[in-house]
């Protein structure tokens, strides 16, 4: 597909993840219709594939299961970090890994990030562990905040 035909919407991946979070069984066409703004079914499929997600969940699970929510939150954080200039690596071990993501700065510094998805009316899973450097909190709308803030690390990356 030519670049000129691809959507230039900067938040397309986050909008797609949010739509996918609301309905994991939605088709790419249904997600494209929901988002609008010139995002096509093909672009939705392409972005989902780039994020390692299937176009549609093909097995039965309850809508909004913890596994779906956590996977979508992790992919939103991956996209956010890549857009900020980090190299990003995801954990592929079981759900009991000590952290979810490793991000590498341009200087080669590795940071370990635990991703927490908001559930149950504004509450996040609790627990602090020294196994990770940052916690990324992801709201159902796709807003991501980091504790501690990544701002100083980003300033150091530019130097």
Image: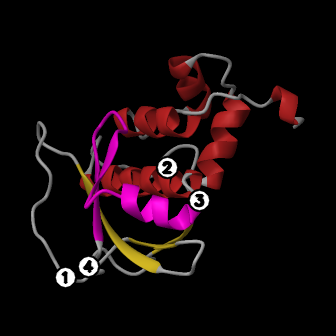
> Is disc 3 surrounded by few (<14), some (14 to 19) or many (20+) residues within 10 Å?
some
Q: Nearer the viewer, mark 1 or mark 3?
A: 3
Q: CA distance from mark 1 to mark 3?
A: 25 Å
Membership of 136 in magenta stretch: yes
Q: Which numbered disc flags the more N-terminal residue, 4 or 3?
A: 3
Expressed as whole percent of the image width and height from the top left, the position of residue 3 reads: 85, 35
x and y, in percent, of residue 157 in the image: 53, 66
Residue 136: x percent and y percent?
Answer: 30, 57
Residue 58, numbered label: 2
Q: Which mark is residue 130?
A: 1
Task: Check disc 4 and report the residue beneath it.
Answer: 96
Tell me if I can see residue 95 in this picture: yes
Instruction: Point out the tag, 1 or 3, that comes first from the N-terminus.
Output: 3
Query: Mark 2 or 1, which is nearer the eye?
Result: 1
Q: On the image, numbered disc 3 is attached to which residue?
A: 85
Classify mark 4: helix, strand or loop.
loop
Q: Which residues are magenta?
A: 134-159
């Amino acid at each position: 597909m030519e670049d000129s035909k691809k959507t230039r919407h900067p938040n397309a991946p986050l909008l797609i993840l949010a739509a996918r979070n609301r309905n994991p069984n939605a088709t790419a066409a249904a997600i494209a219709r929901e988002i609008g703004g010139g995002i096509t079914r093909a672009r939705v499929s392409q972005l989902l594939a780039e994020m390692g997600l299937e176009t549609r969940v093909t097995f039965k699970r309850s809508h909004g299961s913890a596994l779906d929510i956590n996977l979508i939150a992790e992919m939103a954080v991956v996209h956010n970090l890549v857009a900020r200039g980090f190299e990003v690596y995801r954990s592929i071990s079981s759900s009991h890994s000590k952290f979810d993501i490793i991000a590498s700065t341009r200087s080669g510094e590795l940071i370990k990030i635990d991703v927490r998805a908001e559930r149950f009316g504004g509450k996040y899973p609790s627990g602090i562990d020294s196994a990770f450097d940052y916690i990324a909190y992801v709201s159902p709308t796709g807003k991501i905040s980091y504790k501690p803030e990544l701002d100083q690390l980003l300033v150091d990356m530019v130097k």
